[in-house]
Amino acid sequence: MKKTIILFLMLSLMGEYLMAQKASCSVAYVDLQYILKNLPQYESANDQLTLISKRWQKEIETLEQQARVLASNYQTEQIFLSEEMRQQREDEIVAKENEVLELKRKYFGQDGELYKKREALLKPIQDEVYAAIQEIASDKHYDIVKDRTADPGLIYMSNKLDISDQVLQKLGSK
């Protein structure tokens, strides 16, 4: 009878232990900044975005300079101008400043050209990275994969949980 009770207790404890093991989840981490930095196509896309952004910024700066010149000329010539000419020059200055604001909004606004270009160039690369992460997570039976750079509460992480290099290998970059 004593052996049966001990055996029953041991089996119960083992069952609880196995259930606890099964209930726990497997976690892995990636460093998305590291992965993206090591993808040549991502760097190339970023370079393209930088060039486009600089070109647009230069275009805006040219218009801003034109507006400043108009305003400066107006200030120096104001006393020699008729009321009608003053109004015309002021309207020109306001129109040029509005043109600058509209161009800034068009290129760099919330849904501007830069946002659309970034989306077109970077989203396919990011989708490929996420697909590689999902494939590795599925193959290795990870329940959760977290970005270590995006987790402010992460204080320590074992390197054996970092699958960033595996993702790069899956993408053919290592």
Image (cartoon, rainbow, N blue to C red):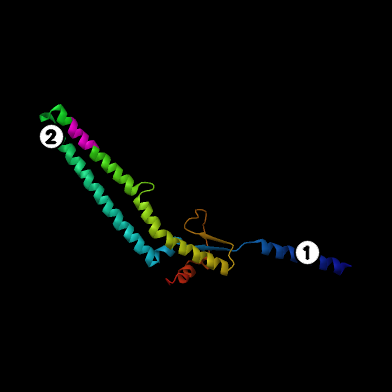
Q: Quadrant of residue 99?
A: top left
Q: Position of residue 34 (x, y in %)?
A: 43, 63
Q: What residue is at 53 percent from the left and 67 percent from the top? A: 135
Q: Position of residue 84 (x, y in %)?
A: 16, 28
Q: Position of residue 67 (x, y in %)?
A: 21, 41
Which type of secondary structure does the marked residue at label 2 adopt?
helix
Task: Magenta stretch: give its range.
Answer: 87-94
Q: Earlier in the sequence, mark 2 or mark 1?
A: 1
The three-letter amino acid code for the residue at tag 2 is: Thr
Depth order, front residue of 40/27:
40
Depth order, front residue of 36/9:
36
- Left or right, 87 with respect to 26, comes to left
- Residue reaching furthest to the top: 83
Per the model, the C-alpha gap separating discs 2 and 1 is 95 Å
Q: Quadrant of residue 52?
A: bottom left
Up-down relation of residue 43 to residue 84 (above or below): below
The residue labelled by disc 1 is: 12
Which type of secondary structure does the marked residue at label 1 adopt?
helix
Q: Position of residue 125 (x, y in %)?
A: 42, 63
**Quarter placement of the C terminus:** bottom left
